[in-house]
Image (cartoon, helix red, strand yellow):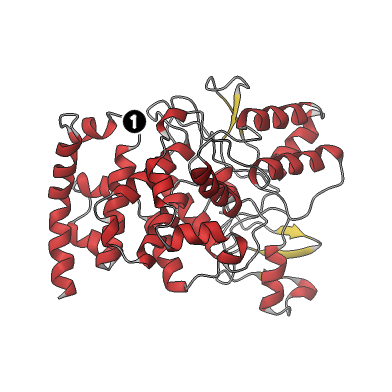
Amino acid sequence: MSERIQKFDSVKFTPKQSYSSQNLPQKRISQINLGKDIVEFQGKHNKQPKSKIKKLAYHATAFIVAGMATAGIILGHKKAKINKINPIFSDFCNSTKYDEAISRFDFDKFGKEGIPLKYSRNDFLEDIKNTLNSVPPQKRTELQEKFDLVIRETGYNPVGIELERIPIIPKILGKTEAEQKIAQIINRFTKKNEVLIDDKETKTVLDSIIKVFPEFTAMIGRKQHDTHHFSVDIHTLKNLKSNILSPKYKDLDNESKLVLKYSTILHDLGKDFIGDITPDKGHAKKSYEMTKQIMKNFDLPESIKKRIINQVKNHHWFEYYNKGETTAQEVVDIFGSKSDLTIAQIMAKSDFANVNPLFHYKCMNIAPEPQIYDDILEEKFLPLDEIINKTAK
């Protein structure tokens, strides 16, 4: 791969690795893993201190996290203690105060449409579509590259389009009307939105989630291919509900419950919409890369961040284990502790069960009975538990 020089604000640097072979727009930044990559300045800039390098990299017009070829990050988090950002979300994650609100709510009824929002996904997509169509083709391409607006056709909504992935908001915006308008549209949908449901307590929790994670908000109403009966947000929230209702949940300490809740909310952020009948591939890795970046914005202990990141990275572990591609010992080694293995088991069970009503039964080749599903999974988990229990002793 030929080395490619990126230019931002007249300062040249050479990233350690380029994404030029992975269909990224030429104007997008190549791999930047802040604090880890060695960025080489040329000419008069070769003596700049590393802190300056980080600053320049961070404020680059386009932002791609390391190792993530096709997912964007909505910028704008403020690094502050999470309980200062949103005390409701802090209460939800650090206690069981709002667990009942999530566990009693019927998310199924929203199906592929997603949680109702004040500024709906269809209105958001329609506004994006109209703004892009209002400018000449060359400018339209520039806007799509700058905001990472990869558009796919779909029959799942009346607008006829869907975004392949989460858009980005560039750190530096141009002054054109179209550019300013697209930034406002994305901000309105992801950061200034609210949930429209009658259950006040559940609304309070969901509003706190979308305020804390604009990346999650960007997934609300995002359709998935036809195997999935739910939008990404409904699938995620059904998982969250199932995880809270799991018999194993009550045995977790509060710190592990926090890890479980964060990991569940973030685990599918990297999902792409390729088409109505075309599944995406590799979203666990993309979700992992996005989670690494998002975690930098939270004042949580590093040990907790690492646990969340590891859960997101490996949330497909059961697929490989069930196929015999990963051994019980390898799974235990991935998660390392009894509590994290329990979290992984809780997440795997719900993730598998919340694709569509029959998917998990067909994959396991069993009768469509919840108790049979529970029993067969516990049987498969048994070798893992035996290994981790011996290790704990």
Residue drawn where x is 76% and y is 33% of the image: 140
Residue 392 position within the rendered picture, expressed as x and y whole percent measured from the top left: 18, 73
Depth check: give the residue in front, 65 or 384.
384
Residue drawn where x is 40% and y is 51% of the image: 99
Please give the count of numbered marks on the rendered protein: 1
Depth check: give the residue in front, 101 or 159.
101
Residue drawn where x is 30% and y is 38% of the image: 353
Relative to 38, is 262 above or below?
Answer: above
Residue 195 position within the rendered picture, expressed as x and y whole percent measured from the top left: 58, 39
Depth check: give the residue in front, 83 or 78.
83
Q: Is residue 67 left or right of residue 338?
A: right
Residue 137 position within the rendered picture, expressed as x and y whole percent measured from the top left: 78, 29
Instruction: Give SS at disc 1.
Output: loop
Q: Is residue 184 left or right of residue 148?
A: right
**Residue type of the residue flagged with mark 1:** Asn
Depth check: give the residue in front, 122 or 50.
122
Relative to 341, is 236 above or below?
Answer: above
Report the residue marked by disc 1. Answer: 356
- Which picture quadrant has residue 248? bottom left
- Which picture quadrant has residue 280? top left
Q: Is residue 219 left or right of residue 100?
A: right
Quarter of the image with the N terminus is bottom right
- Which picture quadrant has residue 12? bottom right
Quarter of the image with the C terminus is bottom left
Residue 382 position within the rendered picture, expressed as x and y whole percent measured from the top left: 13, 55
Whether residue 127 is visible to the viewer of this picture, yes or no, is yes
Residue drawn where x is 18% and y is 58% of the image: 328
Q: Is residue 263 left or right of residue 44?
A: left
